[in-house]
Image: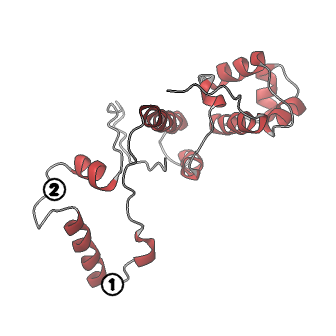
Amino acid sequence: MSVNTIPPSPITVGHALRHARKAAGLTLKQLSESLGLAISTISEIETGKRQVSGVELYKFAKVYQRPLSFFLEESESSPSFAVLLRAASATSVPKETIINFHELCRNYRTLRKLMGAPEMPSPPDYSTSEPTTLDQAEVLAEAERAFLGLNGQPIKDICDLLETKRGIKIFHLPNDPDGFSGAFACDP
């Protein structure tokens, strides 16, 4: 395993800091008051025009409750998380739940890279063959069941089937005491 000795660019760090601020629902003014930094300084850091110091980065990490590594890694973040965060304000899903899920996905992706795990198969893109009739939908469903090797049998373990045949990672999280359940998609 090699150690990355090249520091991330100010743009990479700034992008991660802006993403974390927006995910936390903070304005530049609110963050400025929390950190004791000028709004213009934060703006320059977020746009990569100014490099953040180690002390400043530590302060950002404390405010956002994220490890320093969160801001120092190249992010391949999916735009779907931004959509989920915007939608969270209109639902009962706390933003913190979505942020924690995003962190879980990033950690999983990083762990797979560090271990040199083989690439998982990609799910098919059905958007090009979207069915418009019931007959077309049934043909598509039968083709998928045939690919999955179901041969008309019931699905015994859908999680295992989706992970091994379609490369869709399933995370099982503890039950929410308020009874929340949901599904998220992540493009690693």
Q: Residue at x 41, y 32 (%)?
A: 115
Element assignment for label 2? loop
Element assignment for label 1? loop
User: Which mark is nearer the camera, 1 or 2?
Assistant: 2
Residue 150: image quadrant is bottom left
Q: Single out the residue that lies furthest toward the top.
A: 55
Q: Amino acid at mark 1?
A: Thr
Instruction: Report the number of discs.
Output: 2
Q: Which percent across, then down, holds residue 9?
A: 75, 35
Closer to the camera in the image, 166 or 41: 166
Residue 5: image quadrant is top right
What residue is shown with label 1? Answer: 133
Q: Which mark is residue 5?
A: none
Q: Which mark is residue 155?
A: 2
Q: Residue at x 71, y 28 (%)?
A: 7
Q: Amino acid at mark 2?
A: Ile
Q: Which percent across, then down, holds residue 45?
A: 81, 32
Q: Residue at x 65, y 19 (%)?
A: 62
